[in-house]
Image (tube, helix red, strand yellow):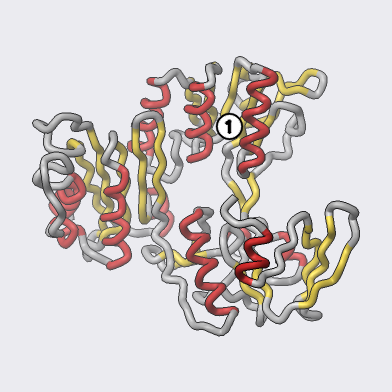
Amino acid sequence: MIRRPETFRDKFNIDVRTGHEVVTLDPAGRRVLARRLADGSEQWEPFDQLLIATGAVPFLPELPGADASGIFGVNTLQRGIELRRFIEEEQPRHGVIVGGGYIGLEMAEALIRQGLAVTLVDREPQVMGTLDPDMGALVAEALRGIGVTVHSGESLTGFATVGGRVTGVVTDVRTLPADLVVLGMGVRPNSRLAREAGIPLGEKGSIKVNGRMETEVAGVWAAGDCAESFHLVSKRPFYVALGTVANKHGRVAGINLTGGDAIFAGVVGTAITKVCDLEVARSGLHEKELHSLGIDYATGRIESLTHAGYYPGAGPITVKLLAEKGSGRLLGGQIVGKEGAGKRIDIVATALHAGLTVEQVADLDLAYAPPFSPVWDPVAIAAREAAKLL
């Protein structure tokens, strides 16, 4: 517990009411209707400024058997606790992960560590849809290396059940035995209250906001996984559910609704995770997005080492950078490699924020010492490779 209600009350003079659910927003009447879960009683609360920070909810398919016992969407700490308790008490043997995103991959590894036979199913041609397929293939190879069976290009069509318990996952290709299923099919903005109140929505159903995190209804703000962002590379509204972005949203909204003046700087879609012994990171746009935007690009993809090869512990790293033809502007980057690889994505993110070209990235004065990097950092090498092709 980072903060308890008492901390908010005693230190910040904030009245925090846990165990309450807002069921209706009334922007015109400047009030919200809250239900006390303990007894079902309801009460209208007035507001001068309203911040909607309802987060995201996991995508749960409306398919036969989806309500069976043993099927979990892991989007909160409590659901994680329930999943672990289920494993301890029921001792399942066959686990199936549906979805090859961050949560799905991390859960696949976790279930392997718990001793289950694990299969991962993803409708995309390759896991990690936020990476290009050639980079996602490196992650799939690592998963297979620890014993995960990976079925790409298969869509979920339903669940087999017996007596209300899941017994299998049905795809358009096969039926997989399962006494435990984890749904890692992504999340969607929890924007129902806003929609019902007539507050305009934006990208992927998130709440539409300006740079101050203000909705199109005066005095109503939105922040976090329920609100949209702005992508600095595509120059378009963008939706991403990440804790880093949500924290920045909240800070900007809090400053503004209390009379200050702050602007959310925008995002470049930077994310990082660890799968098996691989660090996986990305920032900016990937090839599929560039195709949809009609942007002509060149690719620099290299394989190197995380630090000087003669220094103990060096591991492989693959870096892929995408640059705009004509201008040379860096458009995005992806990194997959052993320990020391992932945080290099911050170089890419910083360059994207600054609007650097790949030639400028290649010339950056990056730190070097044998325990940390080759003389030419892998990101600089990839930038040089992309520049050659422009």
Q: Position of residue 312 (x, y in %)?
A: 15, 29
31 over 189 or under it: above or below: below
Query: Helix or strand or loop: what does disc 1 sit on?
Result: strand
Residue visible at 76% across and 33% down?
67
Relative depth, front residue between 273 and 321: 273
The image position of residue 131, as x and y in percent, is: 39, 43
Q: Quadrant of the C terminus?
A: bottom left
Residue sitting nearer the eye, 334 or 133: 334
Residue type at mark 1?
Val
Place residue 159 in its image quadrant.
top right
Horizontally, is 108 left or right of 354 in the view? right
User: Where is residue 382 drawn, in percent x and y?
Assistant: 19, 47
- Of 97 and 387, nearer the camera is 97
Residue under the image location 12 percent in, 37 percent down = 308
Name the residue: 57% across, 72% down.
209
> In the rendered image, which residue does mark 1 sit on?
98
Q: Is residue 72 visible?
A: yes
Q: Residue 129 at x, y = what percent?
A: 45, 42
Quadrant in the picture for residue 331 = bottom left
Q: Is residue 251 above or below residue 71?
A: below
Say how many tags the image has: 1
Q: Is residue 303 left or right of residue 192?
A: left
Residue 244 position (above or below residue 200): above
Q: Is residue 22 left or right of residue 131?
A: right
In the image, residue 263 above or below residue 162: below
Tell me if residue 389 can be seen: no
* Residue under the point 37% across and 63% down: 233
Crowding near the residue tagged with mark 1, few <14, some 14–19, many ≥20 C-alpha atoms within 10 Å: many
Which image quadrant is residue 154 in?
top right
